[in-house]
Amino acid sequence: VNVLRLLLGIGRPLAADDGAEAIALAPERYRPRLTEALAEAGANRAELVAALRTVRPEHREAAAFLIANMPPRDLTSLSRGFLVENIELAYRARAAVPWGKALPDELFLNHVLPYASINERRDRWRPDFLKRFLPAVKACKTPGEAAQKLNATIFKALGVKYHAKKRPKPDQSPCESIEAGYASCSGLSILLTDACRAVCVPARFVGTPLWVNRKGNHSWVEVWDGCWRFVGAAEPGPFDKTWFVGIAGKADPAKVEHRIYAASFARTETWFPLVWDLKIKYVTADDVTAFYTMRRPVTFQVTDTPGGQPVRARLTLRLAGRIVADAVVGEPVAFFLAGGRAYDAEICPPDGSPCVTRKVAVAEDEDQTIVLPLR
């Protein structure tokens, strides 16, 4: 107990005047925003400073990431104990699963570490979910396999069912949904996202404010399995085969209300229109409409030289700076991408020699195999 209290910083005096010292402990790229965040935190500033001081040195980037990106409501209310526990347990899960070590830090920070998806109540769900669900996925080899197992089992285990009217509100936190026994598609999606994150499966809340046929809004979940794959919460089955595939493929990128958004804890320039409260502008997102309207598999192969022999290398694809695919490639591998886009492909040899980056143009509507030479 004393060790846990030490890790969480419970019982340590809060220093009111060492904000600059705490900020200096964080990676340099976070420091300007941390200075702003601590100023916005008001009376809660000491708690955030204590969180930066309390975490293990190897976890300071995680604390900096959360504080630099959290909305004002969290800056003024979240305690050091809540934040440090969340960070420690996220790293514990990462160390426990086969894919954790190879997972890019960018994905871990933005889609495993966060304690919330959108505007839901901030619950302390991670300790319970880690204890409940990690044993169930330890035999899984990939994050996608783990996500599918969770989607098929957790809702019955937690006693939560879909109901559009019996649920108390749309944006329920995990504990609110468990207490009510019912949740909307939004509440179910938050619940599945958090269950995935608890066992180091990158996951994000996705939705559209209004289908193009004007028959309502919908929310679902994307999980990482080398690239983003989508699934309906409490609707177990293959990825990318849900009932809404057809209507999602008709989303209209020209209209804000008909676009598809993926929530991002890291701040973006796009806000997620939450239909239950359109005044909320602190939930940011990536516009992923094209990944539904122009989604298609693209096969990649890495060779040693142009026209040469296949080689093993790590291939990471980015679109507008965001990772959209990542895998160690030996044999040809297919990723699901948005067509008609130009991607940055980073190729890293396993021997530690310098990585190379190449531009990749993905066709709109034709089968495509892209061969990328290392040299």
Image (tube, helix red, strand yellow):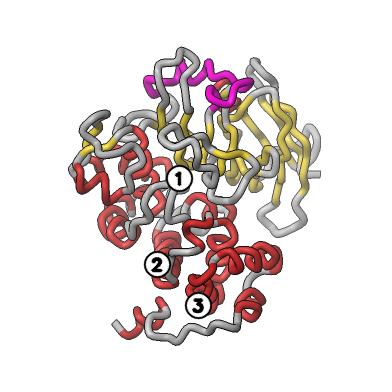
Asked whether the residues under the numbered discs 2 and 1 touch, taking CB atoms below 8 Å apart as contact, a structural biologist would say no
Q: Which residue is mark 3?
A: 50
Q: Is residue 268 visible?
A: yes
Q: Amino acid at mark 2?
A: Phe
Label 2 vs 3, first from the N-terminus: 3
Using the image, tell me which numbered label, if any, was put on residue 118: 1
Residue count near mark 3 (Cα–Cα under 10 Å), binned few <14, some 14–19, many ≥20? many
Mark number for residue 32?
A: none
Pick whichever, 22 or 306, lies toward us: 22
Q: Is residue 164 above or below residue 189?
A: above
Image quarter hosting the N terminus? bottom left
Residue 298, placed above or below residue 170:
above
Q: Image point 61% across, 77% down: which residue?
A: 19
Give the secondary structure at mark 2: helix
**Which residue has dot 2 on it?**
82
Q: Nearer the viewer, residue 316 or 200?
A: 200
366 sits to left or right of 8: right
The one of 348 and 247 positioned closer to us in this rendering: 247
Question: For the residue carrying disc 2, how many other residues have a C-alpha within 10 Å: few (<14), some (14-19), or many (20+)?
Answer: some
The location of residue 347, given as percent across then percent down, is: 71, 46
Distance from Cα at disc 2 to Cα at disc 1:
18 Å
Q: Which residues are magenta?
A: 242-259
Q: Is residue 244 left or right of residue 290?
A: left
The three-letter code of the residue at mark 3 reads Ala
Residue placed furthest toward the top? 213
In terms of secondary structure, where does tag 1 sit? loop
Gap in angstroms between the C-alphas marked 3 and 1: 25 Å
- Mainly helix, strand or loop, the magenta region? loop
Can residue 102 be spotted in the picture?
A: no
